[in-house]
Structures are given as structure tokens and as C-alpha cells.
Image (cartoon, rainbow, N blue to C red):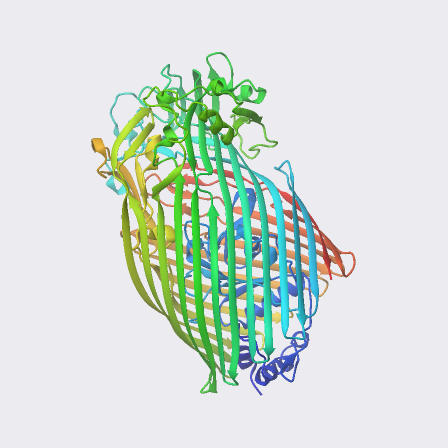
Amino acid sequence: MNSPSQCRSRANRQDRFVLNPLTSACLLALATLATPARAQEVIAADAGKLEQVVVTGTRASLQQSLELKRNAAVVQDSISATELGRFPDNNVADSLSHITGVSISRTAGGEGQRVSIRGLGPDYTITTFNGRLLGTDSAGRYFAFDVLPADVISGADVVKSTQAQLVEGAIGGLVNLRSASPFDQKGQRGLVRAEADRNDMSSLNGKKLSATYSNTFDNKVGVLLGLVYAKRDVRTDTAGNDGGWSRNPIPSDPSQFWEFGNTWGGAIDPNGNGVLDPSEEGLIGPGQFRFGSIMEKKERIALSGKVEWRPSSDVKVIFDGFKTRLDSPQVGYQLSYYPLYAPGRWSDVKVTNNVVTDLTLNSSDPELRLNPEVLNRTEYRVVDTAMYGTRAEWRISPTLNVAGDVYLSTSKRDSGGKDSYVVLRMNQPNTTRIRLTGAAVPDVTTTLADGRDLQSGLAQGLFSGNDFNTHFYSRAGDNIDDRIGGATVNADWKVDRYSIDYLKFGLSQTNRKKSRDMINNAFNSGQDHYSGENAINVGTLGGNVINQTLSPKGFLSGVNGNFPRSFLGFDVDRYAQALAGLDGKPRPGGGVYSSTLSAPAFNPLESYRVEEKTSTAFVQADLAGERWFADVGVRFVRTKTGAQAWDAKIEDIVQNGAFNFTPIYADPSVVRQDATYSFALPSGNFTYSLTDKLQLRVGAAKTMARPSVDKLAPSSTTASISWGDFTQIYGGNADLKPYTAHQADISLEWYYAKSSALTFAVYQKNIKNQITNLYLAGQDIGAPGGRLFNVQRPINGDSAKARGMEIGLQHLFDNGFGVRAQYTRNLSSSWVGGVERPLEGIAPATASLGILYERGPWSMSTTADFTDSFVTATNVIGSGFNEVTNSVTWLTAQLAYDVNKSLRISIEGNNLTDAEQAPRLTNGTVSLPNGYYRYGRSVTLGASLRF
């Protein structure tokens, strides 16, 4: 008789579709050697065919996920749908956050968007759908999970170690999304679900309708179709520091990497002596801050389908695909302040712990007083994502199986010129006092010369267009087109001797083309067309440009302080129409006003074309013994990269006023770079059954992760010149090397009871060539007038190390209760230029605790997901001044009741603790607020009908 370990190695291959007599015998052996409770869950075989026991519900989903983990050849955790067309959470990323070692970041409204594994950020992770790479609408490679409704997914696997047969490109881990098969539940099946939701910070409700249908015919043809439509409105309260913090130079200490500082108009000089005194070196002051609300109307539609044809027991052909559209415009209405230092601008300055914490602005010079600004910041995100593919599997003989797959994956975002960062600037004399309190928004008191108070006056509607001039007029957005075509051929040869079960071979070819066209009015200087001496009083434009006063309920309720809680709003399109009425009229600065010259156009400096052609081959041997199974193999990878961007020299810099400049560029020229790299990536995995319930798993491999696509393009931008920040930011270059890592995993897994397990794992990843940013101040880039620039560019660091441990527990009691818990601890560091610093984007700890109850018609659960504080950017304003996020606990709960076998009703709550995110800049002594996001709680009511 075959041993349990041999059976698992043979009966649970991810690429197996035919259950031959040997596999059936293995399943019977497992049934007889497993515990009685587990034996009932094993599917009996009869003449090479299996009769399937269909179970549904949360407990069945957890049971299936645990079986996938136990029988996997690698370190893996999984999530499975509770029933056809019903994923555990509304968002796949939210479900993944319950998994050991996984954390997520969120977009507006609090929806999960990006996934990090074992602390390593999204750039270290790849996402596939049925083993195929997914195109992304990001400038890089990371997949934004909000573009894909959870309803088109039947499961997800988080693979943390690797095999030669798995697609390369991940150091943190691989997320493989799985679609359902119509043969999972034979016969006619269907589910229709309707939902309504409400966010306590939104004035409108959301709605969602999803439907899934599957059917099989004569056990030869199966069809599965899915449809999803969802629409929801959400609000996110936000505060931030777009202009950053100002900091004086530190010429006496070059180790601070801050010799030239980043202040505008001269170094901050509290004593007014015109000299940078030793006590003033490194002095920090507020540069800019803003606050307001982002209103988002998110609409999704998705179509998915799969057809499986099984003409015989030896042949299977699958046609599958999906197409989704995410229409997610975000309109942000905000109030912003620029209290930047300039000689004669500040008075009554107070300094605490080398930070200016109190200052007054009351200059009679219109350019030196504080001029509060009304900001409309819009992100128009429309994303079309699709994947189509065909897979064929053929058992040529009892010892040889061959499979081939061809697919096309696309992602396209149409946002060019549709985003806005449009500012109206107050033109009234005033006295303003600003006091830093440590809160996300400082205390701000502004009293106008005519006696009006800004805070109370905004709430009472005392301000109109007459109080503002036109100012910054940025119309931007990028068009991104990502196309991935792939083809693979794999073969399995059953050896069944010398402890070798199978030899596996495979070839693949992947071609990726990604383009970004930036459409904005920065390159043509259109964003400054109506600013400075060319500014116009908004009240003279007509058209009711400023058309609303916003006082959102509970606005920034988590932020203490004395600052305006109301702000003005205006419609950018209406504003643009009003500006067009000025066409042909003389500009005080020369020429005439022109809505055509100020309109968004192609910006070559921030655009690129990147092509990647990757060829791979692998060989892998699957082995098994009396109580063990293993695999060893190597994957060969060769990638050719071609990148095109544009460069343009700065011919002139025109000053329009204080902190307002217009760069004039020469005609752009093409920059082309090509690179090639090859890797051999060996891997090995070994699993040993210490007992029937306890197994030890060991894995080791060399892995790699490619640079983000945008970091391969030799693009650069100096757009920040417009607001007086002379910084050149390089996007990247094709010579950046991929990250590589030597990694090892050891896990001990105790499956001590039915559907219950306690697992412990340790891991280490020694990373080379990790990509980080180099920031150099005071660089001569050949700009006219000898003006010096700060330069930021991506570079390969020396090395990095990530190591940690994971503990996971799942226990389902017989009385219907259950508990899931996980804790991950990450320790990491990196070295750049021989200097140690934190590895960006790694949370030192994540944890999750879930409690569930499912018995009879009732189903209940609640889950708390915790992500510890971590560094998101290093050396932001000098050595050791890092941006750090705060820790976040995200609490969800759901309650469902089965009215009968067909009808189910449910209620779900999300972010029930009203969690907030508030990053800070800190060097361990000084702590400066650097952002704030509040998403609010949401509740969803749902009803589903099964047939």
C-alpha cells in the first residue's frame, strides 16, 4: 500500500486533472489512515471516477483552505469561496489580510488595494489569475485589487516559498487567484445576490447585483458565467503635507546628507540677522498643509466566463476569461496654506526642539502675507482589465501528460488630462497665526483686514469668488496601456522509481508591453497661464465658479485643534468654461489668454514605453518516500528589456512671483535604453510526516523580483519648479538590476483535529540589489543662472535582509464556534552605500484574530486585522528622518441567516472601529504629522437566492 506522504504528493498536484487508478488508491489509503473524522472528508474513488460531496458555508470554506495548505508542496495559505459566486469578503484584498503574513494598503473609502507578503511591499509580490500574469493599471507592476470584484473569484492562494514550475518574479510571495470550474458542482447551479450599503461619512447609499450560473452536460461540457454590477459613494477625510516640511541646511555635518536644505527664499532665520547661525542649522518649519474631503463615486461592472470541454478522460480543453471596468472618479475639495519662510514674512517665531511651532504672518506685501487657497483635486480613474486564455491538457499515455496554455492579459487606464489640481488663491489682506500642536492639522487663526474671521466666515458663507484670484491650474492624468501575452508548454513524465514520482519540464514565453502617456499642462507651462501677474479675480469670471460651501458631518472628528471645519468647493469644468471666455484678451505678462495654450497636452518628460520579452525553461523532479515527499528543480530565465523616454533641457526659468516659476524647455529628444539579464533559479522543498498529524516542511530557493516597470524607463521631471521646489526626479533606467534573494523557509504544521491546525514557520530572505531612492541636494543640472537642484533617482542598494516568524491557528469546535488567529513578526534592514537604514514598506508585525459561529441557519463572524507601524520612506528631510505609518486595526463583522435552502439574508459591517491612518516624519526625537486619512464605517445588507 502507498504511504500517506506518497499519496499526498500524487493526488494533490495543482496541475493534475485526471484521477487514474493509482491516484484513486492513494485516496483510499489516506481515508483508511486518517482519523475517522477526516476519513469522512476524503472522496472515494470508483473505476477512476470520483463522486463529489458538496458542502457550503464558512466552515466548509475554512476546511477546504486548510486541506490546500496541508497538501501543498510549498509554504502556502489559501482562501476558498463559501459557495458558488460568494467570496468571504467583498474585496479579495480584504480576505487576504486574514492570512498569516499578509498586510494590505487601502484606497479612498478604505477599500483594500495593494498586498504585501511577509512585510515585503507590493513591488516584491506578483499576482496571477489561474497561473497567468495580470496586467496592471499602475505605473509599475503591482496589481490593484479594487479593479477586480471578488465575485469572479472562487479562491486565492498565497504562495510564500517557490518551485521551479511556478512563475518567477516574486520575493515576498505569489498571489494566485482561482476561478471556479463548472465541474466543481455538476449540474445546473446558480446564485443571484443583491446588496445595499451605506458609509457613515457618505450621504448616499451603494448597491450591488451579482449573478453566477453554471451547468454541465453529459459530463463532457461545462459552462460557467458571472455578472457583477456595483456602485457606491464614499467619503474620505484627509489632511496632508504636499509641499512637505522646510528644513534649513546643515553644512557643518555632511553625514546628515542635508548640506543645502530645502527652504524657499532663504534659510529660516528667527533672529533676523541674515546669517545661518549654528543653532539654526537643520531648523524645521511648516512648508504647506491642507485638509478636506475626497468624494468618490465608484462603479464596477464585470463579466466572466468559462467553458470546459472533456471529450474523453484523457483530454480537457478550457476557454476562460473575464472583463471588468472600474469607473472611480475622486473629487477632493480642500483648503490649503503655504506658510513658507521668506525674509520678512514671519514674525513672533517660537522654536521648540529645533522646530518652529508658532509663527505669525501679517506682512503688507501681498506676496509675503498668507494667502489661503481653495483646492479642487480630482483623480479620474477609469480602468478596463481583461484576460482571455485557452488551456489544453492531454494524457498521451499512462506515464506522460502534456499541457499548453495561451493567454492575453490587458489593463488600460484612460485618465489623460482629466485629473485636476486647480487652486484659487485668496487676495485679501489678513493676519494669520499658525501653531503646531502635534495634530494632523495645526491651529490656524486668520483674521481679514475687513474684520471677517476665516473659520467662522467659511461656515457662514461670508466668502465668494470676489475674495479669490485665479492661481495654479494643473490639468493632468496619464493613459496607461499594459499588454501581456504568454504561452507555456509543460510535460509531466511519471517515473515512479528511485523515489522519483514525476519529472516535469516546461517552456514559456512572455511578452509585455507597457506604455504611459502623461497628458498635462506642465510641459507647455499651461498650469501657470492664469497665475502671478496674469491672475484674474474669480468674481469677474461669472458662471458661479465657487458654487458650494461644504461642512461635512463629523469632518476630521478625530483631529483636535482650532482650524476651519468648512471649506469652499468649485467645479473644474465650469471653471474651465469661464476661463475660455477670456480667450484673446491681453495678458498683463504678455500675449493673450488662450484656453488652447493652457490645455493639457502630451508631456514627453513623464511618458515612456517599456517592452519585456522573457523566455523561461524549467525542470523539476517530484520525489516521495515512506513518510516524505519533495521536489527539486531549477528555472532558467532570460529577459530582454527595451525602454524609451524623452528628455528636454531647461532653457529658461521665468519667475511669476514669490514661489511661482515657469520653466521653458527645449524641444524633447528620445532617450533609448536596452538591457538583458539571465538567471538560474534553483529551488527545493521537502515535507516529512513526523506523525499522521504533524509534518515538517523545509524549502530553499533563489528568487528574483523585477524592477517596477516605471523604474525601467529613463524618464525625468522638473515639474516642481512651478511652485518653487527645484527638484529633478528621475523615474529610472533600464540598467537597474532585478532584486534577487536567497531564501529559506522552515515550518512545523500540526493538524491535530478535524479542520483544525496550529502552524509555526520561520523564514529568512537575503536580498541583493533592492531598489531605493538616492536624494542629492545642491546639484548643477545645467539649468540657466547656475541654479542648483535637488536630484532624486532610483538606485540599486547594496543589500537587504528580511527574516521573521509566523504563527497560525485555526480551530473549529463541534458546537459551531471557531477561531482563526495569526501573528507575523518581521525583522528587516538594508544597506545603501554601506550605511544601514530601514527597508521601506515592511511592517514589523501583522496579526489577525477571527471568531466565527455557524450552526443551523445562522452564521456569524468577526475579524480584527492589525498592521504595525512601519517605515514608508527614508531620509525624507535628512538622514534618519523617515516617514512612518501608524499602526492600524481593521474590524469587520457579519451575520447571516438562511431563511430556507434557497434564500439567505446577511448584514456586514466594515471598519467598525473607524480606524484612521496618520503617517508621520520622525527621527526618533522629533515627530511631525505628514498626512491623515479617515474612511468611516460602512454597513452592507444583502440577500442571495440559490438554485
State the residue at coordinates (62%, 37%): 202
Q: Which percent across, then down, holds residue 646? A: 30, 45
Q: In the picture provided, is 826 more to the left or to the right than 226?
A: left
Q: Which percent across, then down, holds residue 782? A: 21, 38
Q: Residue furthest front?
A: 584
State the residue at coordinates (62%, 53%): 228
**Is the residue 117 above or below the residue 554 in the image?**
below
- Quarter of the image with the N terminus in it: bottom right
Q: Quadrant of residue 649?
A: top left
Q: In the picture provided, is 105 more to the left or to the right than 602?
A: right
- Quarter of the image with the C terminus in it: bottom right
Q: Quadrant of residue 537?
A: top left
Q: Residue furthest right?
A: 900
State the residue at coordinates (54%, 19%): 457
Please indicate, yes or no, whether residue 875 appears anywhere in the rendered image.
Answer: no
Q: Which percent across, then down, holds residue 487? A: 44, 68
Q: Residue furthest top?
A: 450
Q: In the picture provided, is 57 more to the left or to the right than 303?
A: right
**Is the residue 25 above or below the residue 414 in the image?**
below
Q: In the picture provided, is 820 more to the left or to the right than 712?
A: right
Closest to the observer: 872 or 198?
198
**Is the residue 622 above or below the residue 806 in the image?**
below
Q: How many numbered tags mark residues here?
A: 0
**Is the residue 413 above or below the residue 801 in the image?**
above
Q: Which percent across, then down, holds residue 385? A: 51, 54
Please indicate, yes or no, whether residue 712 appears anywhere in the rendered image.
Answer: yes
Closest to the observer: 597 or 166?
597
Closest to the observer: 836 or 167?
167
